[in-house]
Image (cartoon, helix red, strand yellow):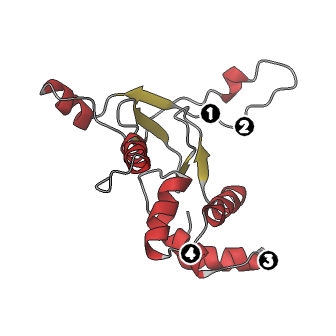
Amino acid sequence: MKAPAELVELFRSNGKKVTPQRERIFHILHGNSAHPSAEAVYARLSAEMPTVSLKTVYQTLAELVEMGELQALDLGMGATRFDPNDMAHHHLLCTRCKRIEDVELAVPDFREFLSYGPGFAVESVELTVRGICSSCQEVQAHGGPRAESQTDQRQGSQRARSRGDKNA
């Protein structure tokens, strides 16, 4: 993904409005290796700009994907995650805590093998390796409970707040 200042220019050259909220989204995403969801970007942004809407975040992310500056990842975990890394890479996904890491693997180019049906042209091949990260393995080795994902923690806090628990 381009640097935030370059994204400002790209948006303007494409006739898109550049607001302080969008500029801050560019900064949140630039160099972010956590593969955040729209909700995670919103949580970080709304802490600084309480009046921002989730719609603004979704719209900005969609436009960045459309422009090829961001990759939307649907890894079957519910929320789409966003990857600003525009270098060729694959992903490691922890099935316990849902952490995603970029990994550079020497993977053969499968496109010629996969283009065996008439009328089907492979455009890309993505590899996601699923397993348990070292942090979750350590928790498991010491007899601890499975590591909660950020989504699990957030949903638990939301349930507690809905029950009136002010400490959630």
The mark that comes first in sequence, 3 or 4, is: 3
For marks 1 and 4 on the same chain, the one whose residue lies earlier in the sequence: 4
Question: Of discs 3 and 4, which sits in the foreground?
Answer: 4
58 or 99: nearer the viewer: 58
- Tag 4 residue: 51
The front one of 159 and 66 is 159
- Tag on residue 123? 2
Residue at x 52%, y 51% (from the top left corner): 37
Q: Which residue is mark 3?
A: 15
Left or right of residue 133: residue 115: right
User: Of marks 2 and 4, which one's residue comes earlier in the chain?
Assistant: 4
Residue tagged by mark 1? 125
| Residue 123 percent coordinates (x, y) | 72, 37
Q: Are marks 3 and 1 in contact (CB under 8 Å)?
A: no
The answer to whether residue 112 is left or right of residue 100 is right
Q: Is residue 44 above or below residue 50?
A: above
Q: Quadrant of the N terminus?
A: bottom right
